[in-house]
Amino acid sequence: MKFSKYLAVLLVCAITPINIATAAPKTITVKPLTELVKLDATEEISGMLLNGKIIYLFGTSVASATTDGFLRAIDSQGNVLWNLPIDSGADDIFTAGTRDRQGNIWIVGASAKSPEITPTPTSSPSALNPDAVVLDPETPLRPDMTILKVWKVSSQGALIKELSRDVSQAILPRAVVATANGVAIGGSILTETGNAGFVVQTGATGVLSKLLAIGQSDTEVNAIAMRADNSLIAFGSSTESLGGKKLVGLRDGVIVSISTKNKVTAVVRSTNSQSMRTWQNATNSLFLGGDAVTNGKTEAVVTKFSAALIPVWTTRYASRGLAIACDLTSQSSAMTFTSTSAIKGVTGWKASKGQVISLFFDSKGVITGAYGASSLKTVISVASNADLGLVVLGTTSVGVSIFHALTR
């Protein structure tokens, strides 16, 4: 499979757990998600982070000659508090972000090498105009996007640090998590035989560590989480043998444990021989989201795991793509997905053509609430905090908007 097409397709999986979550014990009526902000449709927004009532948006915009990354802070009314464009002189993309305990923002992405330009007496630099950009949503990941980039930014929008590593192969970071020494990053990288997953960390000296490859020819890492002992867990999918574990299904979801010495210590695979599966996102509490395709049927799937990577409960629903998992509190969680059918125990819901819904669960996987918006078509990012509640970034028929449900 070609690298560019492979990275663009969201494959599907879910590891078969022991317990299947039951439906809601009482009828749950879908409540409306409230639209907070309509966003600029000319920018490709990759995700968002929350800080009280402040929303950080990051993504990629197209300048006069190159794609540039941007990080922007807005309030809940959409007012821009600050804006930080990143232009290396070559193409840059922002793909994932996180916040550390000090409140700093870490953004990861990739860059191409700057072109060599011979200056002439008549040449002059172009003015940067981050507020008047035009997006080409079909811009592919080019083979020359070989530089892994990390940007550390203060909560006030000041660029603190920029790290980079040229890996000499096309690379796509997909996830980042804060660690004791900075961040750990996961994603996919081109190899001589196909695609491998990778994990790389910032070390105590503040530089990027050696890249840890996971697989060789057909493996991806889509999410990453940190344990209390600072070891890591990577989540994704693969069709090749990993850690002595062979392929079971058409494509297996994989969970890869990584030691503090950056070594793979264990691999857990999905077990359904008829499915294509993948884990697409995860929280540090080990609440995982993804999808499963079996006999042409697509389902959004979430599973709650224990610290020992034993499934606690799981649930799945007919969908048009993946589920995004989100922690609400230490005892509750939510899955957000594009539903395509009725949901048992949930009323006021007609989604045969595909409509976004957020389902709330207690610690045992029982549905405790449901929220939706008829105008939402697909989900880009989901987050939650005490000030804004559940916040959903997604696409509508006219652009991109932010919705929320304040449940307290």
Image (spheres, rainbow, N blue to C red):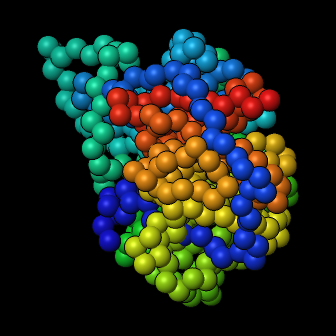
Q: Residue at x 47, y 76 (%)?
A: 294
Side (left or right) of 162 relative to 385: left
Q: Residue at x 83, y 70 (%)?
A: 308
Q: Position of residue 329 (x, y in %)?
A: 81, 42
Closer to the camera in the image, 311 or 196: 311
Side (left or right) of 112 relative to 50: left
* Res 21 quadrant in image: bottom right
**Residue 88 in view:** no
Q: Residue at x 39, y 51 (%)?
A: 353
Q: Is residue 205 above or below residue 188?
A: above
Q: Position of residue 168 (x, y in %)?
A: 39, 57
**Residue 134 in view:** yes
Q: Is residue 334 above or below residue 53?
A: below
Q: Is residue 128 above or below residue 113?
A: above
Q: Quadrant of the C terminus?
A: top right
Q: Position of residue 391 (x, y in %)?
A: 62, 33
Q: Quadrant of the N terminus?
A: bottom left
* Res 246 quadrant in image: bottom right
Q: Is residue 279 above or below residue 183?
A: below
Q: Residue at x 43, y 30 (%)?
A: 400
